[in-house]
Amino acid sequence: MLVLTCHACGVTAEETEFHAGGEAHLKRFGPGSSDEDFEEYLFMRANPKGVHFERWRHANGCGKWFHVARDTMTLEVFGSYSAQAFAPPEELLSRIEDRRPGWRGQD
Amino acid sequence: MSEPVSALKNISDLNGIAAIREIGPLGMITLRGDLSDRAVQDAAKTAGGANAPDQRKINAEGDGGVAWMSPDELLILCRYDEVPLRMTNLQAGLSKGHALAANVSDARAVFEVSGPRAREVLAKLAPVDLTPGQFEPGMMRRTRLAQVPAAFWMTDAETFRIVCFRSVAQYVFDLLKIAAQPGSEVDFF
């Protein structure tokens, strides 16, 4: 079971109170982009075994979106951060580095 | 004006391990806006008769009060017949800024679960830590009851008030009734 903390309202609850929103920090390629870029944006998703950044929505609570960093294999949750962030905060990245040395090269 | 009718006509079930009553109709106004804005805070205070609460808290007294619903949303509670007047005052107080006040009284159903085992009944249905000390009067929790969204708070140490959508009122009443059926004590708390 995943236990997540909503970054917007601070509630810590198990995953049935939330709704998963897929991979985080995707860059949108819309009209005018190349077919390859558009296909990549629309269909191609990272599927790492290990550290993963995701979007979640507090569907049965405050209703807000937020970001979560977790391990897809052990289900360890490293932390959550604002939905308005374009990239994970440095402080969170260094915490992940402590737990999973060298994880950045694994994607 | 026609008489307001609550969703289940104030049905109750007093045979279980906690007393379940549908109460209401209760006046409810959703107020959305920038909660750090003084105008929004003042409007909420005037309409709800209490200060705007901190995150995940509720300032309630009797049927009136103000509850924190999300980073940009408050729920104002009042008597059902006072809603039109309070809406008028809210609209006047909020006319200069960007905010929304909507009367949602008829979109909701309100239940009261009371008794020494009320915590137990709620804990069977919601993924919330209801241990005394973790959840206490003054806190507001939006969550789910089995399959539907709901919010609840405590009016005293043994009484919960639950709000849910009116369309699922029968479902929620049935849930509570089953969770409180005689002989289903867990004795966890």
Image: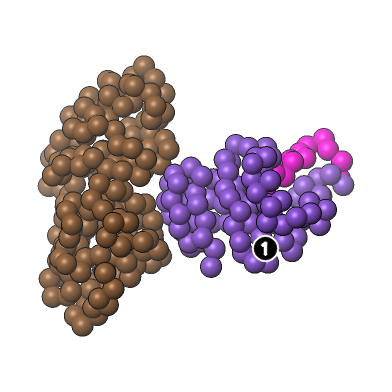
Chain colours: A purple, B brown
Dividing the picture into quarters, in which one does residue B117 lie? bottom left
Of the pair B79 and B170, the residue shown nearer to us? B79
Q: Which residues are magenta?
A: A23-35
Q: Position of residue A99 (x, y in %)?
A: 68, 56
Magenta-span inclusion, residue B138? no
Residue B112 in view (yes/no): no
Query: Which chain letter matches label 1?
Result: A
Residue ID at (27%, 43%)? B58
- Image position, residue B177 (x, y; %): 23, 72
Residue A104 coordinates in the image, percent (x, y): 78, 51
Q: Is residue A99 left or right of residue B53?
A: right
Where B149 falls versus B46 (above or below)?
Answer: below
Q: Is residue B124 visible?
A: yes
Residue beneath disc 1: A72
Quadrant where the N terminus of chain B is found in the figure: top left
Is residue A30 one of those drawn in magenta? yes
Please state which amino acid type lies under the numbered disc 1. Thr
Residue ranking furthest to the bottom: B183
- Give the residue at x 13% y 44%: B62
Q: Is B176 placed above or below B58 here?
A: below
Q: Nearer the viewer, residue B107 or B67?
A: B67
Q: Residue at x 37, y 61 (%)?
A: B128
Q: Is residue A77 above or below residue B55?
A: below
Q: Name the secondary structure under disc 1.
A: loop
Count of number-bearing discs: 1
**Main secondary-structure element of the magenta-colored stretch:** loop
